[in-house]
Image (cartoon, helix red, strand yellow):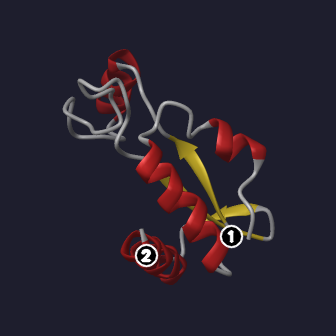
Amino acid sequence: MQLTQASLKRLDGVHPDLVKVVKRAAEITAQPFQITEGLRTLSRQRELVKKGASRTLKSRHIAAPNGLGHAIDVVAMVGGRISWEVPLYHRIADAFKAAAREM
């Protein structure tokens, strides 16, 4: 599968090693996925905590001392729509693990 331009844009500011893993995972999985978020500001993280979408202000999405984010959010896609079916996320996780081992 190929990452969309929007997903690639959302990788801006993410550590290059993680970006490599994401791109390789996309190459080796048949399960389409998209990146919904990478680097976040502290204010965005506060907003997510307030809404209950996150539980911490110490997210790895927030720039580390090196200025880079060290986390991404991923969604599985089925027929062009987001799916929350758990087995799809296991497939994506397997691709990420295989890509990380390769790197």
**What kind of residue is marked 1?**
Pro
Quick one: 71 or 89, which is closer to the camera?
71
43 horizontally vs 77: left or right: left
Q: Where is residue 66 drawn, in percent x and y?
A: 29, 26
In what element is the residue under mark 1? loop
Quadrant for the N terminus in the image: bottom right
Q: Where is residue 54 drawn, in percent x and y?
A: 30, 40
Residue at point 56%, 33% (across, down): 12
Please give the residue where the numbered disc 2 appears in the rendered image.
102
Between marks 1 and 2 in the image, the one whose residue lies nearer the viewer: 2
**What kind of residue is marked 2?**
Glu
Quick one: 5 or 73, which is closer to the camera?
5
Q: Which mark is residue 32?
A: 1
> Residue 32: which quarter of the image?
bottom right
Residue at point 75%, 51% (across, down): 4
Residue at point 57%, 45% (across, down): 36
62 horizontally vs 1: left or right: left
Q: Tell me: residue 26, above or below residue 44.
A: below
Q: Residue furthest right?
A: 79
Give neighbour class at mark 2: few <14, some 14-19, many 20+ (Cα, 10 Å). Answer: few
26 horizontally vs 97: left or right: right
Mark 1 / mark 2, whichever is N-terminal: 1
Tag 1 near tag 2, CB within 8 Å: no
> Residue 26: which quarter of the image?
bottom right
Q: Tell me: residue 38, above or below residue 50.
A: below
Quick one: 87 or 27, which is closer to the camera?
27
52 horizontally vs 16: left or right: left
